[in-house]
Image (cartoon, rainbow, N blue to C red):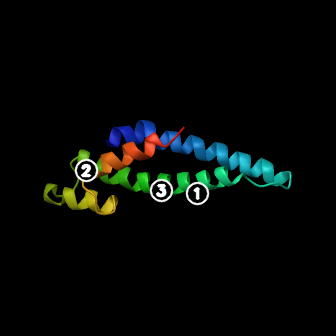
Amino acid sequence: TAKDLKSKVCPMLDSRLKDLRAKKAALKKQGEALSKTDAHNLKRFEMARETYGRQLKALSDVGEGKGDFTAWDDIIRSATGGRDITEFCKDLADFMSTIK
């Protein structure tokens, strides 16, 4: 899962954020604003990137065997808002299915 976050999810979010921020800046120069949909997506992608960045670090640490292995479940739950790894994977799949 850390590999997927690192190689697919986070780069995709970074790309979408870069595009939306560039669009926002271009529109601002013209005295216009993002559409409601784009503004919503910008906030949603910013929140997702922050969340998945935290989760990537936690999952990478566990995958690399850092820290006490008895605390790994707690580390993952802390980074995922109390969800275990299976719930996290389901949430990630649900999120990815909403991206077009």
Image disc number at residue 50:
3
Seen in the picture, residue 67 relative to 63 is either above or below; the reply is below
Number of numbered discs on residues: 3
- Left or right, residue 86 beside residue 55: left
Q: Of helix, strand and loop, which one carries label 3?
A: helix
Q: Where is residue 34 in the image (x, y as percent from the top left)?
A: 73, 52
Residue under numbered circle 2: 85
Q: What element carries label 2?
A: helix
Give the crowd class for mark 3: few <14, some 14-19, many >=20 residues within 10 Å.
few
User: Pointer 2: residues within 10 angstroms few (<14), some, or many (20+)?
Assistant: some
Give left or right: position of 70 versus 56. Answer: left
Disc sitting over residue 43 in the figure: 1
Instruction: Write the residue at 32% across / 46% down.
Output: 90
| Labels 2 & 3 near each other (Cβ < 8 A) | no
Name the quarter where the C terminus is drawn.
top right
Badge 2 or badge 3: first in the primary sequence: 3
Amino acid type shown at disc 3? Glu
Above or below residue 71? Residue 10 is above
Tell me which residue sits at (23%, 52%) in the image.
66
User: Residue at horizontal 43%, vertical 56%?
Assistant: 51
